[in-house]
Amino acid sequence: MSGRINSAATETEVLIFKKENRLKEIWRRLKKDKLALAGLFLVCFFIIMAIFAELIVPYAAAVTINPHNRLARPTNEFIFGTDGFGRDLFARCLHGARVSLSIGFITAIATAIAGSIIGAIVGYVGGKLDDIVMRALDIFSAIPSILFAMAVVAAMGPGIFNICVAITVTSIPGFVRIVRSAVLGIAEQEYIEACRAGGTSTARILFRHVLPNAVGTLIVNTTANVSQMILTAAILSFLGLGINPPQPEWGSLVSEGREFLRTAPHLTLFPGLMICLASFAISVFGDGLRDALDPRLRT
Amino acid sequence: MKKINVTVALLLVFSMFFAACGQDGTGDVSSEDRTLRLSTRAPMTTSDPHGTINIEDLMVMRQVYEPLFRQNELTGEFVPLVATDHAISGDGTVYTFTIRQGVKFHNGDELTAEDVEFSLQRAMNSPRVRSYMAGVADVRAEGDGTVIVTLDQPNAALLSNLAFVFIVNKREVTEQGEEFGTKLNLAGTGPFRFTYLVHDIEWRLEAFPDYHQGEADIKNIHYVPIADLAAALIAFESGSLDWLIAPIANWDGLVANPAFNTELSIGNHISYAVLNHLNPPLDDINVRLAIAHAIDKQAMNLIAFDGLAENANFMVHPDKNVGAPSEGVTYNLDLDKAREYLAKSAYPNGTHVGTINVSAGGYFERMAQVLQDNLMAIGLTSDINRMDSASNLERGRNQQFDIMTTGFSPNGDFDSWKMYCHTDFRGTFYNQYEGDVFDWEHMNYLWAKGVSVADVAEREAIYRELNDWIMGTATQLPIFHRAGAYVWTAALNVPVNYPNYPIVYEWSWK
Amino acid sequence: MHRFIIRRLLMLIPIVLGVSLLIFMIIDMIPGDPGSMLLGAGARQEDIDMLNEELGYNQPFFRRYANYMGNAIFRFDLGRSYATKRPVLDEIGNRLPVSLIVASSAIFFSLIVGVPIGVLSAVKQNTLADRIPTGLALLLSSQPGFLIGIVLMLIFSLRLNLITPHGIANWTNYIMPMVSLGLPNAGRQLRFTRSSMLETIRQDYVRTARAKGATERTAIWRHAMKNALLPVITIAGNNFGVLIGGAIATETLFGLPGLGSFIVTGIRSKDVPVVTGGIIVFAIIFALVMLAVDVSYAFVDPRIRAKYIRRKGLA
Amino acid sequence: MSENLLTVKNLSVEYRTDLETVKAVNNISFTLNRGETLGLVGETGAGKTTTALALMRLLPEYTGRIPNGEIIFDEKNLVTASDAEMRMIRGGRIAMIFQDPMTSLNPVMSVGDQISEALEFHNELKRNKEEIGKRVDEVLNMVGIPPGRKYDYPHQFSGGMKQRVVIAMALACEPDLLIADEPTTALDVTIQAQVINMIRELRDRLGTAMIMITHDLGIVAQTCDNVAVMYAGELIEVGTAADIYKSGDHHPYTAGLFGSIPNLKTRSRRLTPIPGLMPDMSNLPPGCSFSPRCPNRNELCETTRSSIYRNGTHAVNCRLFDGRGRWIKEEKAQ
């Protein structure tokens, strides 16, 4: 810790200095990691783009059809070219960001929260609870996400929120399993036994000691999930279980472009690029955050 | 670093091995017994011709089994196969078929009238093909040469329906019993017979030497299921398939390629929009007429089918179906007229017409989005609900929808459109005309009259009136007839491509 | 330890019951019925009812479920597919090996590619040797399933004309599916290996190993790697389980008759025996894979093995 | 081979991070003969462990640097030795025991394997499997652990037992020099005594030279022939155990150290700790680094460094001894 205290300081001052210092410390380390910064910048860029999409290109441009200008190559008028309906692909990608990013973030974070809580408890407590919960998860992960999505849509009707529910529920088992394996390793550490010996409550141990130590795996897993969620949403909406046309969404743009892959590759290229860049940015920022948060990594 | 070199070495070995293994099948086998390699979009579900109505299966069944008469999909004319001739009684309820003599089944048995009687009765009891035997009261074999089919009421479309009922060998079917259809059988009379059948992986046919019309030119056929169109096209272009119904998107590239023969033929199918006359604002005839004139068929054709389809004025294609009228009430793009009707309607400055339901996947989705855009042009807003086919079908059946973009294939006779209008077929159609909105009894009367008359010109007149009646309701709006894009290797000689079911018997190697 | 395994195998029964009940309920909830699906739009209602009757779909929910499960457990008869009338067990019989080959080859590929590069990028953290593979891994793992497959097909089947792109005629058909499923999984494997290696590489026992005179590679591979195995095994096991039933896009693209596409076709045509039977078999295999993963934990980490032994009352 | 085993001349070690450069060790020199034990004493953070890691060339890869100085071990300069040469020395000729036994052992490898591994790295005698196995049993016996337990895993041993395993591992290859970095700090007193006695006994039996790094003067008294007191990266007083422990002339810091040890004989209620804290190693004061805390400092101390004053085997780095009695001032540039 480079926050060395040269002069004698009162107890509280030290604490404040310590806390504020830790955030400054994390930010300092993050700033040093150029790639993570680029990632953060790109993520903010996408979010801003999604929010102010309307100002950049009106939504109408993304939905008005022009049969005589179909599958046009990118020109300066249509930066990304046009899709099978003659609609401006750039506008569709822009307005698609709003849906895709929200799906990607909401489901990834929801899965992360639910997954890590269950995973931590199951990995730490073990015994009967571990068996029951893990077997229940085995049941859930056996159900294909498509069937689950159909059930959710049949019960609660279509729509973006229901799709997020369907995707989240089907991806929680995988996440729990990963967190559990990380927690199994951590629960064996001596300092955990020390806390237990010190009479700290299980909940406090879990959230103050166990999970922070699994933060590396959590972040990596969550960031990896984001692109996966966007693509799963596309598969579901392609089966008629999610976002209805003409609402643009990155995943369905890629799937629609698939048919013209050989004659008009730009239809798959640009939305695919968007998904890659978004998940690349999020993952790289996640990695940078992971390294910055890890106190032992003094480079 | 040593670890990484190992991985790189491994990948190198892989790629070298790639280059080593050659390509199977394109060797220059003598053209005489070269194998014809075809693909279907889904694995064959059954080898029982009475156990399926799905197109993928029927493509194979057509080569192995034969009906009494086959109807030529393009000309509508009937080709005698198992039967040589037929006679219809005065009141049109008794059909007498004379059975061809000397026809052999693939298992060597001689075809008898009893086999025909057994097959027709079996079809009547199989839920999947029962609808083709609609109206048939009794089937009786008389002696060896004739079979008598009696109807409870006249049905001129019987021959078109019977073209979908295949004749099987009674002994083979009864012997296999419950297992019939789940494995290889020799119960057919067609030009090819099964030699190898592993349902999900591959099925092979060979030319039947004792075929009653003479042995086929093509000696062997391999069918392989390829669900993905892009993969099938790549398989064709890389030479491991000889004939394919190609994806529309790559059509120009294929036409330009000298190594391939290509043919584009308009299919006997109609893609159309359905308006539910029970749900306001669609209960207002002027709104429906406005919509009818707002639909841009050319835009639909361009976007949904790359311009290769044929814009349609009639639900049933006049040249491809017996009795189909070629004149009558039609609607074409005319925005002024559309706005006129809208002005006369209860919603002069536009309204929200509801939801367009469509099954996910396929070009119907694209039609829905074009329709939405067309309606926007005259101030009618709508949204689209893309559903999986099961729920879409359910909604359609119970008339829980506002607008739908869908399609169906008539089977060669105008009467086959009846399933989508006649009130008896409650389970099949989307528009239930029964009720106090329309004079539906008159429509039913016309349907019944149409089939009770044998003379084609007379039938056409009746069906013209019927067509005008239905088009008048502006509930079923024809948009285009989709095209079949056929491509085959130059070494293959394909005289004609039928829209749905190729007849390999007519093909030959160059 | 074997007591633990036996107990886990006994747990398969509740899993199978749970899965089948859940599926029966879900399918009942979804609109549509097998009759209308199989006969299509043009069918008449009475034909549909007759077919549903024949298939036994009209019986009350619990009788149908009881019949089905009765056959499944006591006579290992998973019923006959509505569409093809063929016993579901036979269908799964020839489809399961295909799925297992595809899944295991893809996971094998992802381990060979993912783990070593993951370790390398952890050791050489924040240098080019770390950035490039991590970046590439991200690029690959955020690709839709079909894209890599089609690109491979364009190169190897069309341009180089080396492999027939469909069917399972010979083993070369499995190369492209392996790569197109293996690459995204390799990307994920790489990132997890890197993350867990970063945590173990700075442990004191790795320094002790160096103090004993170990080469850098021994210190990394024998000491650090062995401790980083837990998450690596979990990911591999998880991906393997998912791939068996989840490689639908690849199975469809390459025309491989796998378990995934079999179940999905069943779902879309409401073929209850196929969906239930298929998912029950998949659930059993998935549970066995998870059991294998848990057992392998014990082999890798003695402390976890001790946990099982302690639970046997020795502690 | 000469009597002198290790000579360290003007050794400095820096930790260079993006933000600051920490001068952990500044120009220290000392020598060590075969079979002798040197005690390296000082507060936490004085640079003791850094010195040990420098000797073993185990400084962190990116940040650890040795800007100047030599480490001559058996006529070989370890600072410029190649990695391959260092690998032969580490574990074979110089072995190290780390402070925290809890984390020094690989949790997923059996204790026996971890010891035999060291033997495999340094298998000049080409021992085969059984011979190595026998050697492992031998070494375990030496540290008082029943050989039967060599298949157990670290989590099945107590802290004290783990430290014995670490010691066994270090002595397996009979190194010439053993560096013990606060071997007993993590253990409780009773176990501490056992471990220290065992180390001393093994050292005498095997004739191993040793550097005992500790802040516990009691341990130094029991085990060391010579003592070097380290403060802020510098050796401020070096001498034989006798020189350091007999009262009289001492560097003020050393006096302070002894002053802060509770003495059972005299009834003193208050200890006299040294006021203030260690200086910031990233910006050391120009003069004597102890000057801020030194009771008898003068202006000179704060501005210029003192030179070393020697009296026989006893050397002190403090200006107080200028011209006092038998203390001779040594020229700076040795």
Image (spheres, rainbow, N blue to C red):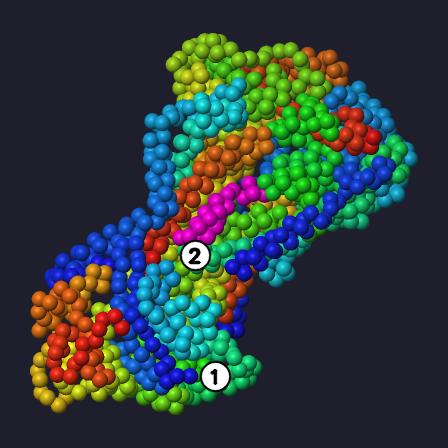
How far across and down, in percent of the image, does residue B187 sit?
81, 42
Q: Amino acid at mark 1?
A: Val
Q: Which residue is mark 1?
A: D136
Q: Amino acid at mark 2?
A: Lys
Residue D311 placement, left or right of A288: left
Chain identifier of the residue bearing label 1 in the image: D
Query: Which residue shows up at 40% across the image and 82% down it?
Result: D176
The front one of B148 and A151 is: A151
Bounds of the magenta span?
C126-149
- Where's the C terminus of chain A, which quadrant? bottom left
How far across and down, in percent of the image, does residue B449 sit?
68, 18
Residue located farthest toward the right when viewing the structure as drawn: B102
Query: Which residue shows up at 42% across the image and 69% down it?
Result: D81
The front one of B411 and C223 is: C223
Q: Which residue is mark 2?
A: C124
Q: Is residue A204 magenta?
A: no
Placement of B447 over or under A136, stated as above or below = above
Within 10 Å of disc 1 (Cα), the crowding (few <14, some 14-19, many 20+) is many
